[in-house]
Image (cartoon, helix red, strand yellow):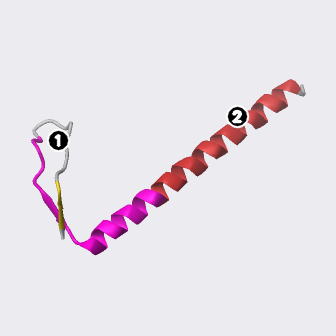
Amino acid sequence: MSARKTQPDDRPGDAFAEDIETSDEAAAQLAELKDELEKAVEARQRALADFANYQRRAAQNE
């Protein structure tokens, strides 16, 4: 198990969070979820860029 220090939260009333104990399995799952999130964000950015290009080309063809 590994301990990870968390950062303070910006919400009112929150101080530094306690140390969080995570199992190796939980840490691996967290890493996998972070990877999935990163891929989803990249896919969304590509889709938004594609749509912006589509709109630009459509406006040029008018």
Residue positioned 17% across, 41% down in the render: 8
The quarter of the image holding the N terminus is bottom left
| Left/right of residue 40 with respect to residue 21 in the rendered view | right
- Mark identifier at residue 21: none
Which amino acid is tagged 1?
A: Pro
Q: Are marks 2 and 1 in contact (CB under 8 Å)?
A: no
Residue 37 placement (x, y as % from top left): 46, 55
Instruction: Give the image quarter of residue 32.
Output: bottom left
Cα distance between the residues tagged 2 and 1: 37 Å
Q: Which residues are magenta?
A: 14-35
Could you tell me how many numbered marks the image carries?
A: 2
Instruction: Categorize mark 1 by other alpha carbons within 10 Å: few (<14), some (14-19), many (20+).
Output: few
List the single residue furthest toward the front.
Answer: 2
Residue that lies at the very extreme toward the bottom in this rendered image: 25
Question: Which mark sits nearer the N-terminus, 2 or 1?
Answer: 1
Q: Quadrant of the C terminus?
A: top right
> Element at badge 1?
loop
Q: Which residue is mark 1?
A: 8
Asked whether, in this view, residue 35 is left or right of residue 49, the answer is: left
Q: Position of residue 49 (x, y in %)?
A: 67, 38
Q: Is residue 56 above or below residue 43?
A: above
Q: Nearer the viewer, residue 11 or 8?
A: 8
Q: Does residue 20 belong to the magenta stretch?
A: yes
Quadrant of the rendered structure where residue 10 is?
top left
Question: Does residue 26 lie above or below 15 as drawn?
Answer: below
Residue 12 position in % (x across, y down) = 14, 35
Callout 2 secondary element = helix
Residue position marked by numbered label 2 in the rendering: 52
Instruction: Please give left or right for residue 44 compared with residue 25 in the image.
Output: right
